[in-house]
Image (cartoon, coloured by chain):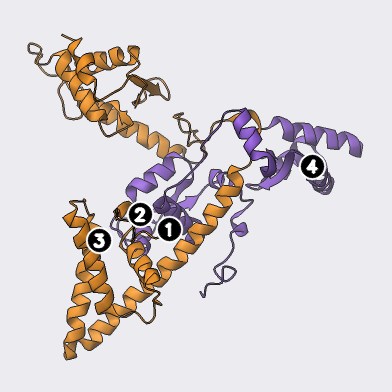
Chain colours: A purple, B orange
Amino acid sequence: MNKNGLKKIIEAILFSADSPVTIKEIVSFLNVEKDSVEQVLTQLKEEYSNRGVHLVAIAGGYQFLTSPDVYNYVASFHKRGTRNSFSKAALETLAIIAYRQPVTAQEIAALRGVQSVSQILRNLLEKNLIKIAGRKDVVGRPALYKTTKTFLETFGLNSLEDLPSLEELGVEE
Amino acid sequence: MDNFNSIEIELDNFTGPLDLLLQLLKKHKLEISDVSISEITEKYSEILKKMQERKLEVAGDYFVMASTLMLMKAKSLIPREKEAFEEMKEELLFKLEEYEKITRQAEVLSVFLDKRNRMWRRGFKEDFALKDKGVFVQENGGYVLGNLYSLLIKRLKAIEPEIVKRARYTMKQVVSHIYEVFKDKKKVRFYEIVKGRDKSFIVFSFSSVLELIKESVLKGVQTSTFSEIILIKSRNYSYKNRDKVISRYE
């Protein structure tokens, strides 16, 4: 397979997918070198950087997403209004889980200074933004919560490392 | 936004007592480290009082904080309790500092979300904010299954057999009950309507709901066969004109 052929295939696979495709998936499916896939992706990303559609590294994979510059047009053409939104309490809860995972419900409640966060957790679980990842080895064996891939996708993060540290935010640890 | 100046002090503006405290400090331009407990106790209690005067429902969380603050204030006045007071203060300040970090991190998430929300993926799958579609069984499979199971158990309980007596309800009663349930809600689960009621009430409710769906008073959504029925107000729902609709049923 020559380089141009590979580029076409990868572009088409990404175009036709509605969720992020990982390098690993492409490599194992096409049975090609990881390096050449990475090269193609970098090239495609570059080529699309000025287009109405961007190739975005998200949730550990790559996905074509419309450019934020043309958001209004796309939204109103397809008559889409509100998008994913969260209450302040839900965002706080997600922030705690994202930054300190794995955490228990009790730890989250203590940090937020409230008695119970079970309603919010249930909501986030239903939206598949968090998951139960094991149990803490203490009395009662409470569930430990972690964020999911859907969380990364929803917040446009490639990995949790994209989240700036407190230091970067100008806050003392 | 200043949540204090508006006449409408709503607890909804705060995510909890720590949030309220933190915003109080910000409003009075106080640093967490040099806050005067007695001053902040006063201000905090003032707000709670105002809210109670307006007969707002104040969550227990806020009273727990109020009593903690008052206990601290009391301790601060007793010389031999000084050490205990300092300890409590330190703990509260630590909590506030930790909480402030969380609010910063939540802001970060909010910025990421805004940016991502300005991009669309192919195929225009609805966001979960817009859809009443079911949960995709992904990493959460276990949780989803558990949920379905508990739903099943609940449903079995709801329809435990009972000797059927003559109908104790009329469609009128049931329809007006449904109107009451939806008075302050947009979306209700069918089980909320029939919670704790007997079998004949469930039957009446179900046929009433079907009628109301036909009349476009409600909309029914089900994520999959046998899953919970979610009811949403539809265009013909009007609490004011409910009598007109109710009178049609005998």
Vertical order, B244 against B42 (above or below): above
Residue under pointer 1: B1
Of the two numbered discs 2 and 3 on the same chain, state the one appearing first in sequence.
2
Of the two numbered discs 1 and 2 on the same chain, state the one appearing first in sequence.
1
Residue under pointer 3: B62
- In the rendered structure, find residue A48 and report the number of the disc placed on it: 4
Residue under pointer 2: B13
Residue B170 found in image quarter: top left
| Residue A145 shown left or right of residue A152 in the figure | left
Residue B95 found in image quarter: bottom left
Three-letter amino acid code at the position of disc 1:
Met
**Tags 3 and 1 touching, CB below 8 Å:** no
Residue A38: % across, % down: 80, 48
Name the residue located 64 percent from the left edge and 41 percent from the top edge: B119
The kind of secondary structure element at disc 2 is helix
Residue A168 found in image quarter: bottom right
Residue B111: % across, % down: 56, 54
